[in-house]
Amino acid sequence: MPDARIWRRGAPESAAAAEWEMRVRPRRAVRTAWIVAVLLIVVFAIGGIWLKSGSTGVKFRFIDQVAMVGIGVLLAGCVLMLTRPRVRAGAAGVSVRNVLGDSDFAWQHIRGVSFPERKSWARLELVNDDYVPMLAIRSNDGEHAARAMERLRELGAKYAEPNPQGENDSGR
């Protein structure tokens, strides 16, 4: 079955994995995340600077100001985790990286890809009636997402093994 790994840092890339024919990353979500991250840092930095200027009866120190900026940086880092999603596809299969982890799927484990109505992102349909959300292909990216889905379907038709029994999934 698929190989799912979380936090795959420093893992050696195989020769097949290095030859991805398709790479997709979200566009609007990345831009929005960067804007929100910068705003969080600015707002918390300004809040940290103004922390000492109030007369609330509480005595704030320099370390409290630094902590306020640190909280802003921490929150910005959490928001920037939303820039991680990526989908790669090639002869070896499909690699899906979402916010917290990676999953690699060989073509034999993939039934198809779909973009359910009223959903924000596409999903990879697996043969065991499971699915994996692909946060990199988002509905708000419009034409970019449509091209990514079309390309992923082309690669699926190119590399996926035909059904040996000639069965159709719609007859369940």
Image: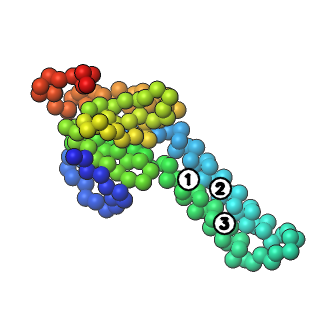
- Asked which quadrant contains residue 114, the reply is top left
Give the alpha-carbon distance from disc 2 to disc 3, as whole Å: 9 Å
Which residue corresponds to the image point at 25% horizontal and 50% vertical from the top-left?
3
> Does residue 57 show up?
yes
**Measured from the top left, where is residue 105 in percent x and y?**
26, 43
Residues tagged 1 and 2 counted as in contact (Cβ below 8 A): yes
The mark found on residue 69 in the picture is 3
Which residue corresponds to the image point at 38% horizontal and 36% vertical from the top-left?
123
Q: Residues within 10 Å of mark 1 (few under 14, many from 20)?
A: some
Hey, which residue is sitting farthest right in the picture?
55
Asked whether 113 or 148 is in front, the reply is 113
**Measured from the top left, where is residue 18 in percent x and y?**
25, 48
| Badge 2 element | helix
| Badge 3 element | helix
Task: Residue type at mark 3: give it.
Answer: Val
The mark found on residue 159 in the picture is none
Give the alpha-carbon distance from disc 1 to disc 2, as whole Å: 9 Å
Going from N to C along the chain, the mark reached first, 1 or 2, is: 2
Q: Residues within 10 Å of mark 2 (few under 14, many from 20)?
A: many
- Asked which quadrant contains residue 7, the reply is bottom left
**Measured from the top left, where is residue 131 in percent x and y?**
34, 39
Task: Residue type at mark 2: give it.
Answer: Leu
Residue position for label 2: 40
Going from N to C along the chain, the mark reached first, 1 or 3, is: 3
The mark found on residue 79 in the picture is 1
Give the alpha-carbon distance from disc 1 to disc 3, as whole Å: 15 Å
